[in-house]
Amino acid sequence: MTTESTAPPTVRGDGRPPVLTIKDLHVYYGNIAAVKGISLEVYQGEIVTLIGANGAGKSTTMRTISGLIKPRKGEIMFEGTRVSGMRGDEVASMGIAQSPEGRRIFPRMTVLENLELGAFLRKDRTTIQADLDRVFDLFPRLKERVSQKGGTLSGGEQQMLAMGRALMAEPRLLLLDEPSMGLAPVLVEVVFEIIERVNSQGTTILLVEQNALAALKIADFAYVLETGHIGLEGPAADLADNEDVRNAYLGLA
Amino acid sequence: MATAEDSAPPLEEQDDERTIPVRQTTSAGYGATKWKLESIIGMIVLAAFSAWIVASFVKGPRAFIQVLVIGLSNGALYALIALGYTMVYGIIELINFAHGDLFMLGSVIGAISLEQWLGQKSSSPTAWVWLAVTLLFAMAACALINIVIEKLAYRRLRNAPKLAPLITAVGVSFILQNIGIKLNGSAPHSRFSVLPRGALHIGPIEVRIKYIVVVAITAPLLLLMTYIVQKTRTGKAMRATAQDRDASLLMGINVDRIISYVFGLGGALAGAAGVLYVQVNETTRYDAGFRLGLIAFTAAVLGGVGNLLGAVIGGVLIGVIQSLNDGAPLFLGQEWTQTVMFSILIVMVIFRPGGIFGKHQQEKV
């Protein structure tokens, strides 16, 4: 199932090279292949979404981009620099931040400490403070709970904290892994609105989602992952209309 | 040790905003009645123990207080060693069984440098200066040794099953003991103390100066440690790494370097403990680390492994219990001391594996 969606040759990124390029990426857990040769591109200012079923390799791809897993084969380039093979902290220092699957906030630190850790690599106090204000503006809830320990927050609040923490790094590329997981429907909408807002403020976003419908609505371009390889790709709007995608992922036959 | 599970608190996935404020940190999922019974028994034990201490004090206040001072001094040393156990456990969940032997190396290195290299064998102001130099030297040496051990032996086992680094630590312990034999000989080696021999007299109570010196050196070290962990950027990175290593990497924290740093700090404290131990006990032996290490480990368990403040309090408590049992009226006497101390270890592991403060407390590192 490919062909029809690749038809309109939309020019992505106004002729500029992509911010993130993944070429023929293979990732293994022991002897088990989780990602089997995927290639994708993210251009400046885009929201690109990676959708697919459980176990398709979405989170593995995200973890590999961030340097938490080493790929067995293939290459990840960020702004012209090869980041595959770098340590996680080195990737972060390149300007890639991630709000990981399962949130992974620091449970025994306060909301403020969590956010400050997001800005760990930054030195300039005043711009950090400005970004802190921006995060509180996006997530007023976090401001109310600023001195509460991360582990005592609700799932939705933790999700906000994880996203806020990633934003505190002032990333040029923001990776969001399942930001809507486990959230009440009302909150899902809020989270997607915030993603759009962050994007409109200039941050390039790679979004992994199981909530394919919502993801396709806000994304510019989409890749559909099927057990470790890319089955379909195209402008998000086209994929949302695609018969196969609607059947398989949107439940809207 | 059961403290591991609190690093990932199970959080229910229901997100109705209105239900949020109810959730608390405490011992969720633990049967409330069981908890109650446990705390009642705990209270009774505590009350009995306090009554015993009061009775002992009433019976012989002078002896009691003198013994108490010795206990505080010993306890300070245990606290220094226990911190090394607890910090390493906090950050990589390894009970570093070689840590006691590192302390032993600190004592031997310190004694050799003070006596053989610097030629200081009696108390004088010059000797005190050299003692300070020796203290710093032994701290640096032990920090370096510990960092190298982590790099060579533990780092590559970081993602291996828990048993592998544990056995490796036992192996490292033997290696350090053999280095100890090489440097110190297989028999106990008597050493000189350069601290003043005298005592301070406060009313009828006599306090040996060496015990005061130990506490006076240990206390600022412990404060410095607290400052580093709580206030500095590196300290914050240490706490983050202890709580979630992958998330720390995502923040841009160089986790390998932070872990090295923790081993360095723990090693430095063990080195300081070694030098002070020689000044108090005037002896070095290659197997000193085994017993002292176990006692310090007991202290760490008492305070909750992974809990910094707990290690200090546990160390002081163990030191005091030990010396009270050794010398205070109405206690069992020296021949029972080890039995008492390791009974405490067993009782703690069975009934309160999270330490006297419970497991949902304080800062791991």
Image (cartoon, rainbow, N blue to C red):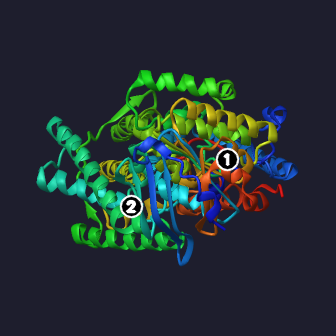
Q: What subunit carries mark 2? A: A
Classify mark 2: helix, strand or loop. Answer: loop
Can I make out residue B54 in this image? no
Numbered disc total: 2
Image coordinates for residue B85, horizontal then vertical, percent: 47, 55
Identify which amino acid the numbered label 1 is placed on.
Answer: Ala
CA gap between label 1 and label 2 equals 34 Å
At label 2, counting other C-alpha atoms closer than 10 Å, the crowd grade (few under 14, some 14-19, many 20 or more) is some
Asked whether the beta carbons under mark 1 and mark 2 sit within 8 Å of each other, the answer is no
Relative horizontal placement of residue A238, taking residue B254 as reference (left or right): right
Q: Nearer the viewer, residue A130 or A47?
A: A47
Residue at image location 66% in from the left, 41% down from the top:
A218
At label 1, counting other C-alpha atoms closer than 10 Å, the crowd grade (few under 14, some 14-19, many 20 or more) is some
Relative horizontal placement of residue B263, taking residue B352 as reference (left or right): left
Nearer the camera: disc 1 or disc 2: 1
Question: Disc number at residue A174?
Answer: none
Q: Name the residue that disc number 1 marks.
A: A237
For the C terminus of chain A, which image quadrant?
Answer: bottom right
Identify which amino acid the numbered label 2 is placed on.
Answer: Gly
Can I make out residue A97 in this image? yes
Classify mark 1: helix, strand or loop. Answer: helix
Q: Nearer the viewer, residue B103 or B206?
A: B103
Residue at image location 18% in from the left, 54% down from the top:
B113
Image coordinates for residue A19, horizontal then vertical, percent: 43, 46
For the N terminus of chain A, which image quadrant?
Answer: bottom right
Q: Name the residue that disc number 2 marks.
A: A85
Residue at image location 60% in from the left, 54% down from the top:
A234
Image coordinates for residue B13, horizontal then vertical, percent: 78, 47
Q: What subunit carries mark 1? A: A
Q: Earlier in the sequence, mark 1 or mark 2?
A: 2
Determine the residue located farthest toward the bottom in the rendered image. Answer: A31
